[in-house]
Amino acid sequence: MKIAILPGDGIGTEIVEQAVRVLDATAQVLGLKFETETALVGGAAYEAHGHPLPDSTLNLAKAADAILFGAVGDWKYDKLERALRPEQAILGLRKHLGLFANFRPALCYEQLTHASSLKPELVAGLDILIIRELTGDIYFGQPRGRRTAVDGHFPGAEEAFDTMRYSRPEIERIAHVAFQAARRRSKKVTSVDKANVLETFQFWKDVVTEVHAQYPDVELEHMYVDNAAMQLVRAPKKFDVVVTGNMFGDILSDEAAMLTGSIGMLPSASLDKNNKGLYEPSHGSAPDIAGKGVANPLATILSAAMMLRFSLDQSAAADRIESAVKAVLSAGLRTPDIWSEGQGGTRKVGTREMGDAVVAALLGGAAAKATGKTITTKS
Ligand code: IPM
Ligand code: MG
């Protein structure tokens, strides 16, 4: 099993290092063999090669069975032309590898119910799955650019424009992914659109409804995106599988992440039609805490578990990692982002110690026995 490791920028390198240690420990315990190769991506690749997604990195990703990705981006690249900005690396990987199906589970761990900004009873036991279409919509639609307006409110003025578009096959394939995922869960899909205003999303709604005819055992509900944003903080547990376009999915998945207490806990998978995938934490590169050793590595570690389950057909190994994560949370270990005074956390730890604890839990040692200094940074 060949895994491409792309740590990226900011906290990306720190968290991926821990996830790789956890993969190594898993391989050791279960007698698996992973071949890993690391490459630069994002700002780090731009510094070294003048491009955020050099051919060497893209080719490594193409040749691998799965990709473990950290995060890209830093404010210092905000002034670069768009094609050279770190974000283009992840957008390019999605596009070039055809990773159209993005799974973003939002799961509230019972140990972290109090870390959410919502009332504990609203989020206790929350387990929803956002399925975001990832290679279409206004993110990739052409044409786009800047020009002089020939009509509109201010003819002759400078203007910018993007194109929102979806083709029937693009909507059909993501709808199938969502209905099939729902069959493995509680058989309910909420399709989020803006059909009351946008032609693209009236079409989305129509095509999803047509595909639904093949899944009579699954319940389908349609919801406008503004209402979905509201319902997510009003009664999030009413949702199970949510399927939506690239743009709405970007926004709603960050909102859903916060319900769980910390975006530092949420893994994600981006799959192609053959279940080859790129796995990354749902959070970004967090340049403000990069290099401080305080970032939460659990989202990346859980992404590695998703990789084992979805792309490498090793669900027993994935279960082991997920249990190890639960064990360290139960043992009271907390990185600053999930620390809240008097709510079950007994030791505030850094990135490496959290990795140590998961490795120890995997290797059979009690998580609480993990050694190392307790950090004192205030969250
Ligand atoms: C995400 C991120 C990316 C996106 C950025 C980094 C391009 O926000 O994965 O949600 O907008 O898709
Ligand atoms: Mg986003």
Image (tube, helix red, strand yellow):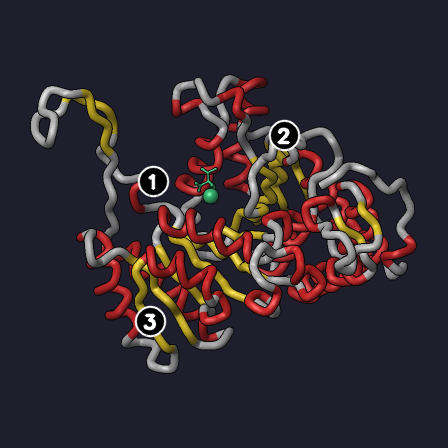
Q: Quadrant of residue 312?
A: bottom right
Residues 152 and 367: in front is: 152
- Left or right side of 4 for 149: left
| Mark carried by residue 221 | 3
- Mark positioned earlier in the residue sequence (3 or 2): 3
Of labels 3 and 2, the one closer to you? 2
Q: Is mark 1 within 8 Å of ligand 1?
A: yes
What amino acid is labelled 2 in the image?
Answer: Asp
Q: Mark 2 — residue?
A: 288
- Left or right side of 287 for 230: left
Tell me the distance, in whole angstroms, between the alpha carbons under discs 1 and 3.
25 Å
Of labels 1 and 3, the one closer to you? 3
What amino acid is labelled 3 in the image?
Answer: Glu
Q: Quadrant of residue 31?
A: bottom right
What amino acid is labelled 1 in the image?
Answer: Tyr
- Left or right side of 336 for 143: left
Q: Mark 1 — residue?
A: 139
